[in-house]
Amino acid sequence: MNAHTQVFLIDGAVGLLECALDLPDSEQFVQPRGLALVAHPHPLFGGTMDNKVAQTLARSFLALGYVTVRMNFRGVGKSEGVHDHGQGETDDMALLLTHMRRQYPELPLALAGFSFGTFVQSQLQQRLTAQNDPAQPPAERLALVGTAAGKWPMPNVPANTILIHGELDDTIPLIAVLDWARPQELPVVVIPGADHFFHRRLQHIKNLVVEMWHR
């Protein structure tokens, strides 16, 4: 993402996983305010941790003072294995969280994702909640962009989740997200004129996440 990004490998269930770590500005933040994991879009359709929306989410959390880490899902970049329809990817994201918790055991957790990545992160949040492990608490909040409602079986998410969607998304239609959010009474922030990949509207994502995060 930038010259200071640290790329590293961790052991996954089916091989090595490529990850990227970014640290908040040490002059602006004496201590990190939290730990954020960012998940990228569908790997079988070109999704990588360098996807522009995933990078925008990472920049959003860096601006908030969070240690921010991304991971290439199975079969992407230097990550080994093959696509596992969200189940293995959730396992791998949990392994990344465990790895990061060894370095940052006390920081509040944020989970962020784009498209397919929203399915992975919502499943991880559901798993962390069910585990009820004080050493591995659920995320304090989620930020989901292009939520994968209707594409994958999205679980319910916490009431304070930030949901951002493009008005003209033809990959995941806005109506599918509204139908999923409605029973949960979740607000959805709609970016007028935005397509699935938020071409020429990426800055709206960062502005919204930064402005809404501590509300």
Image: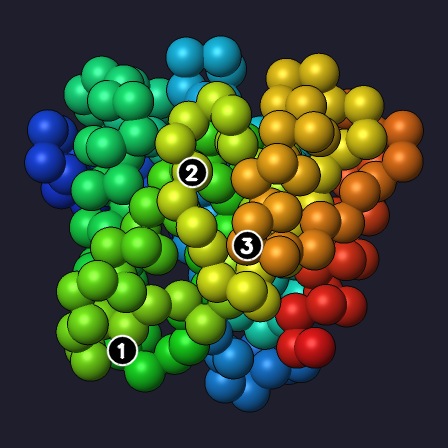
> Of the residues shown, which amino acid type is indicated by label 3?
Gln
Figure check: 168 above or below 118: above
Q: Is residue 113 above or below residue 111?
A: above
User: The residue under label 2 is which amino acid type?
Assistant: Met
Residue 154 bears which disc, if any?
A: 2
Badge 2: residue crowd in 10 Å (few <14, some 14–19, many ≥20) = some
Q: Are marks 3 and 1 in contact (CB under 8 Å)?
A: no
- Front of the two marks 2 and 1: 2
As helix, strand or loop, the secondary structure at mark 2 comes to loop
Which label belongs to residue 105? 1
Could you say which quadrant of the image residue 16 lies in?
A: top left
Find residue 184 and name its label: 3
Residue found farthest to the top: 45
The residue positioned farthest toward the bottom in the image shown = 30
Q: Residue furthest front?
A: 183
* Colour mapping: rainbow
One can see residue 9 in this view: no
